[in-house]
Amino acid sequence: MSTFRGVAVALAAGMAALGSAALVLTAATAATATPATAPGRSFVVVQPAGPKDLKTVGPYINSFLGYIEGRAGVPAASFKAFYFADLVKGEKALLEKKPGFAMPTVGLYLKHRAALAMHALVRIEVEGKLDSGYHLVGRAPAAAVTSLAPLAGKRVAWTAFDDPAFVSKVILAGTPLETFTLQTVLQPVAAARAVIDGTADLALLATADLGAARKLPGGDKLVVVWNAPIVPNPPVVSLAAASTADVAAVRDALVGMCGDTAKGGKGICDEFHISGFVAATDAMYDAVAAKLVKP
């Protein structure tokens, strides 16, 4: 799952048809412009299963950058964003572009936080919740299970929403992905539809996606077969290239954003279906990180 719904579920939220280069966005210019921006003022946004169409995602991220610039008191187009709806390309950008800020998946953050000096600034809140649930969903009369062993060999549709090691060790409680026959789809609704149509046995869905899945024709037949451990929502992070002043400015802007009616922050959050950004620390993710180092 992407943390937000649609663009929102995605922001946080790319590229037209996922070409070889990222979508580059600035708040004050056309979405395809690439003004000279210091690396410390660039965002890499990685949201697998997020929107891939430039016209869809561009205005949302532009408004997000514009709000940060306004609150930080810096000139328009001081910040730019590179958006990736592809996990592999997004990870490569984190490693090569060395941005000052990022919105990574939880798995990418934990995988690279030490090497890239990534530090959590805020945690994304969706519908008042700072954590996300994940579920394996089947079609009635599929029976609920308390372990994944009985599901070995099942066809599982999913969106490849995060780093494979994170999904295996954290979401699937240490079960190798090879235990299942994985079917990768572009959107959570497609995973649910595959179960309804019988082309998959199970779908790996986030709690936020269950409601939409059950509204599909035949969605009333979907049943939760297994519940994954709850995990924290993704952070917005700073990296080594960001200045101390910019880190403070971005954190302060985000923490107050969703309650700011005067300067439009609440409207932007509403468009993203985000209820808030809550100040965060790296320690909030340590329990999840410990699962990743287990053999």
Image (cartoon, rainbow, N blue to C red):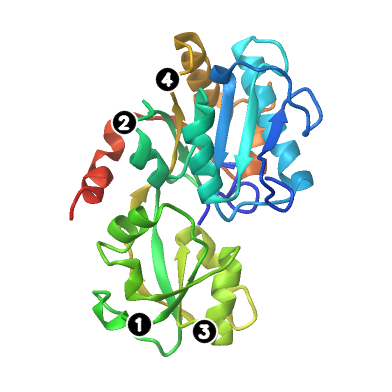
> Residue 254 versus residue 182: which sits nearer the camera?
182
Tell me if residue 180 can be seen: yes
Q: Earlier in the sequence, mark 3 or mark 2?
A: 2
Q: Secondary structure at mark 4?
A: loop
- Residue picked out by circle 4: 240
What's the CA distance linking mark 4 and mark 2?
Answer: 11 Å
- Residue picked out by circle 1: 153
- Which residue ends up furthest to the left in the rendered image? 295
Disc 4 marks a residue whose amino acid type is: Ala
* Quadrant of the snapshot with the C terminus: bottom left
Pointer 4 and pointer 2: residues touching (CB < 8 Å)? Answer: no
Q: Earlier in the sequence, mark 1 or mark 3?
A: 1
Disc 3 marks a residue whose amino acid type is: Lys
Q: Earlier in the sequence, mark 4 or mark 1?
A: 1
Label 1 packing within 10 angstroms: few (<14), some (14-19), many (20+): few
What's the CA distance linking mark 4 and mark 3?
Answer: 49 Å
Residue 67 drawn at (x, y percent): 66, 23
Q: Earlier in the sequence, mark 4 or mark 3?
A: 3
Residue 85 drawn at (x, y percent): 60, 49
Q: Secondary structure at mark 1?
A: loop
- Residue picked out by circle 2: 114
Residue 31 drawn at (x, y percent): 77, 33
- Residue picked out by circle 3: 221
- Answer above or below: position of 245 versus 224: above
Q: Earlier in the sequence, mark 1 or mark 2?
A: 2
Q: What is the count of numbered marks?
A: 4
What's the CA distance linking mark 1 and mark 2?
Answer: 35 Å
Q: Which residue is rendered at x = 18% and y = 52% of the image?
A: 294
What's the CA distance linking mark 4 and mark 1?
Answer: 43 Å
In the image, 177: left or right of 37?
left
What's the CA distance linking mark 3 and mark 2?
Answer: 44 Å
